[in-house]
Image (cartoon, grey):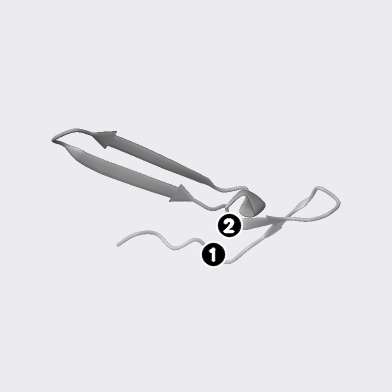
Amino acid sequence: MTLHSGSLEIDSHENVGTAVTIRIPTFQKLENGTREAGKEERKPQ
Protein backbone atom coordinates (compact mmCIF):
# COMPACT_ATOMS: atom_id res chain seq x y z
CA MET A 1 0.00 0.00 0.00
CA THR A 2 2.84 2.39 0.81
CA LEU A 3 4.33 1.94 -2.66
CA HIS A 4 1.04 3.20 -4.11
CA SER A 5 0.80 6.17 -1.69
CA GLY A 6 -2.37 4.61 -0.30
CA SER A 7 -3.80 4.41 3.20
CA LEU A 8 -5.81 2.08 5.40
CA GLU A 9 -8.22 3.34 8.07
CA ILE A 10 -10.05 1.14 10.57
CA ASP A 11 -12.74 2.61 12.80
CA SER A 12 -14.20 0.15 15.30
CA HIS A 13 -16.72 0.67 18.09
CA GLU A 14 -17.85 -2.01 20.51
CA ASN A 15 -21.46 -3.15 19.97
CA VAL A 16 -21.69 -0.94 16.87
CA GLY A 17 -19.39 -2.38 14.21
CA THR A 18 -16.25 -1.74 12.22
CA ALA A 19 -15.67 0.40 9.15
CA VAL A 20 -12.61 -0.25 6.99
CA THR A 21 -11.53 2.32 4.38
CA ILE A 22 -8.83 1.54 1.82
CA ARG A 23 -7.60 4.40 -0.37
CA ILE A 24 -5.37 3.86 -3.39
CA PRO A 25 -4.81 6.91 -5.62
CA THR A 26 -5.69 6.65 -9.31
CA PHE A 27 -2.40 8.24 -10.38
CA GLN A 28 1.13 6.95 -10.65
CA LYS A 29 4.04 8.94 -9.22
CA LEU A 30 6.84 9.07 -11.79
CA GLU A 31 10.56 9.16 -10.99
CA ASN A 32 10.78 12.87 -11.85
CA GLY A 33 8.09 13.69 -9.28
CA THR A 34 5.27 14.30 -11.74
CA ARG A 35 2.04 12.34 -11.73
CA GLU A 36 0.53 10.31 -14.56
CA ALA A 37 -3.21 9.68 -14.67
CA GLY A 38 -4.31 6.10 -14.14
CA LYS A 39 -7.50 4.35 -15.13
CA GLU A 40 -10.78 6.13 -14.56
CA GLU A 41 -12.03 5.74 -11.00
CA ARG A 42 -15.12 3.55 -10.59
CA LYS A 43 -17.80 4.79 -8.24
CA PRO A 44 -19.66 2.37 -5.93
CA GLN A 45 -23.13 1.44 -7.07
Who comes first in sequence, dot 2 or dot 1?
2
Q: Which mark is residue 26?
A: 2
Q: Position of residue 28 (x, y in %)?
A: 69, 57
Label count reads 2
In percent of the image, x 37 and y 40: which residue is there? 10
In percent of the image, x 42 and y 40: which residue is there? 9
- Mark 2: few, some, or many residues within 10 Å (few <14, many ≥20)? some
Q: Quadrant of residue 37?
A: bottom right
Q: What residue is shown with label 1?
A: 40
In percent of the image, x 39 and y 59: which residue is there? 43
Locate residue 6 relative to residue 37 in the image: left or right.
left
Q: Nearer the viewer, residue 36 or 31?
A: 31
- Mark 1: few, some, or many residues within 10 Å (few <14, many ≥20)? few
Q: Which mark is residue 11?
A: none
Q: Quadrant of the C terminus?
A: bottom left
Q: Quadrant of residue 39?
A: bottom right
Q: Position of residue 7 (x, y in %)?
A: 52, 44
Is residue 17 positioned above or below 40 on the image?
above
Q: Amino acid at mark 2?
A: Thr
Q: CA distance from mark 2 to mark 1?
A: 7 Å
Locate residue 2 relative to residue 23 in the image: left or right.
right
Q: Quadrant of residue 13?
A: top left
In the displayed orientation, state which residue is furthest to the top.
Answer: 13
Badge 2 vs badge 1, beta-carbon distance below 8 Å: yes
